[in-house]
Image (cartoon, grey):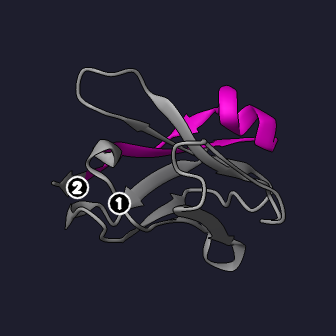
Amino acid sequence: QVQLVESGGGLVQHGGSLRLSCAASGRTFSGSAVGWFRQAPGKEREFVAAIGWSGANTNYADSVKGRFTVSRDNSENTVYLQMNFLKPEDTAVYYCATAPTIAQAMSVPRYWGQGTQVTVSS
């Protein structure tokens, strides 16, 4: 069983940066793709970014492309989301989730973390 824990959220000013981490416990996820999602207050959960098992393939939502970068360190069982040039509309709870393939990580992931709050002030 894979357990995921997100961390790194916080309060930042418009234009600031944060680095989120998604750490696996219980079992490794080196063979799994990982997706990042977010949910703003009163809104549906939306896809943010995804990364394949090796880190070679990545995908991003249009809203974050060019500002966010997803990466992973399989030796540490951790996936990262570097968030730059943050905007107030990026405010949300951010979640990571795993799936066998990057396509599934973007749509029907199997396991989810508890989420970490990101708040961007105007």
Residue 44 occupies quadrant: top left
Q: Earlier in the sequence, mark 1 or mark 2?
A: 1
Taking depth in this image into account, of 53 and 68 the one nearest to the observer is 68
The label shown at residue 120 is 2
Q: Is residue 98 left or right of residue 100?
A: left
Quarter of the image holding residue 113? top left
What mark, if any, has residue 86 been given in the picture?
Answer: 1
**Image-based side of 13 in relation to 76, left or right:** left
- Looking at the image, is 21 positioned above or below residue 101? below
Tell me the quadrant of the picture where the C terminus can be found.
bottom left
Residue drawn at point x = 24 percent, y = 20 percent: 42
- Residue 54: give x, y in percent of width and height: 83, 65
Q: Position of residue 6 (x, y in %)?
A: 40, 56
Disc 2 marks a residue whose amino acid type is Val
Which amino acid type is marked by label 1?
A: Leu
- Disc 1 is placed on an element classified as loop
Any magenta on residue 107? yes
Residue 100 visible to the viewer? no
> Which residue is rendered at x = 29% and y = 61% of the image?
9
Is the C-beta separation of discs 1 and 2 under 8 Å?
A: yes
23 horizontally vs 66: left or right:
left
